[in-house]
Image (cartoon, rainbow, N blue to C red):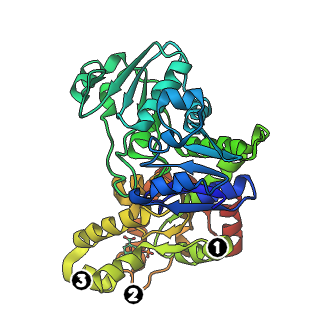
Amino acid sequence: MKYGLIGETLKHSFSKEIHSLIADYDYKLNEIPKTDIDAFMKSKDFTAINVTIPYKQTVIPYLDEIDPFAKKIGAVNTVVNRDGKLFGFNTDFYGLKSLFSHAKIDVEDKTVAILGSGGTSKTATAVCENLNAKKIVKVSRTKSSDEISYDELYKIAPSIDVLINTTPVGMYPNTDSSPIDLTKFSNLKGVIDVVYNPVRTKLISDALSIGIKAEGGLYMLVAQAVKASEIFLNTTYQDNVLDDVFNKVIKDKENIVLTGMPSSGKSTIGKLLSKKLNKPFIDTDSLIVNKTGKSIPEIFNERGEAHFRKIEKECVYDASLNTGAIIATGGGVVLDKENVSALKRNGKIFFLDRPIERLFPTSDRPTANTEEQIKKRFFERYDIYLSTADHRIQNTGDIEKVVDDILRRV
Ligand code: S3P
């Protein structure tokens, strides 16, 4: 391996994709079991690598030189082999620092609470010190001498200006969890979550919903990769490279979620988008049929609408865990706020607004099998479709135009 990433499990890593957008070396993902890491580092059979969990500390004794920030943090995520000598760096530091400036969250003279006590917590401490934070409070469940517990944090919640989550709480596949209840933090000005999958964790959506600036960890991930690539190739990229790569990654990763009334065109348009963008197509109704082995009218007839909604919710959650997919939802999905929150974690919602006179009843749709049903549901739901949407797309029948309109907005 010349360039790449080493770690124990790398299945969910975005790094290969990100590096392919930055430079043209072949970046490989190399899973190394704990028993083999010593031999790998001693062999020095690489040009330049990134290092992830659980080896960011393990690699340090093999280095000939270590960058001062990496030394201070006690973790290395980039190693380059220059003529047989290994040099170690910590570009997570630069990544997190860039994330603060991207999020426009100011730390200078502020009191910052850092959740978690792992490696990234040390990086966050170093960044906050570097940005001249007034006070840094470290919070952990297993509190050590320089940490406080979550209960103690809640007691001093009004004194906290900025909160940083470095724990894995809220990360795929447990995206319904958040490490902390933000309602107690009356003076909070910013929230950073280093988790990048999902793109917006529950913590980030909670913060945004109460008007607090908040940003997830994807920008940090891209920024640390850009910096690592500079070190790999001993070069400096222009300032726009980071934002350009980030915009491409987010466009690639975010789901396009289609909502709207039955027969508003979600499946047809979803399939077209899937072809054009070469992204997988997921239909939540099909997930329900696959899961239950029954048709939707059968589920409604045998167990009723409430049971259908319960299964629908499970399937929407599963669909929401995808990245880079086109998701067509059943017409009633937006009625449940938790469905909407889950779908927004990795996606943007496009409401297909088709005029009522163009919606037609069909016998396989229990909630839209007569004109009266359609009218009733349309008027009950229209405001919900609007208020839950990131984009409203008019569909007056020209499918190509609808697809173009969506593509323009992504
Ligand atoms: C429903 C819409 C249907 C399907 C179910 C319930 C609804 O999906 O989920 O029959 O409540 O509007 P379509 O919108 O794809 O028809």
The mark total stands at 3
Nearer-the-camera pick, 46 or 336: 46
- In front: 146, or 391? 146
Sooner in the amino-acid sequence: mark 3 or mark 1:
1
Task: Report x, y in % for residue 229.
Answer: 69, 46
Q: Quadrant of ligand 1?
A: bottom left
Q: Earlier in the sequence, mark 2 or mark 3?
A: 3
Q: Are marks 1 and 2 in contact (CB under 8 Å)?
A: no
Residue 136, image x, y percentages: 41, 19
Residue type marked 2: Ser
Is residue 193 visible to us here? yes
Name the residue at 44% across, 84% down.
362
Residue bearing mark 2? 363
- Helix, strand, or loop for circle 1? loop
Looking at the picture, does residue 51 appear above or below residue 376? above
Residue 241 drawn above or below residue 340 = above
Label 2 beta carbon less than 8 Å to ligand 1: no
Q: Secondary structure at mark 3?
A: helix
The crowd level at tag 3 (other Cα within 10 Å; few <14, some 14-19, many 20+) is few
Name the residue that disc number 1 marks. 278
Q: Position of residue 17 (x, y in %)?
A: 63, 59
Q: For the point 42% across and 37% down, which residue is it?
A: 119
- The answer to which image quadrant residue 239 occupies is top right
Check disc 3 and give the amino acid type: Asn
Single out the mark in the foreground, 1 or 2. Answer: 1
Which residue type carries mark 1?
Answer: Asn
CA separation, marks 2 and 3? Answer: 13 Å
Closer to us: mark 2 or mark 3? 3
Tell me the SS state at disc 2: loop
Q: Is residue 409 visible?
A: no
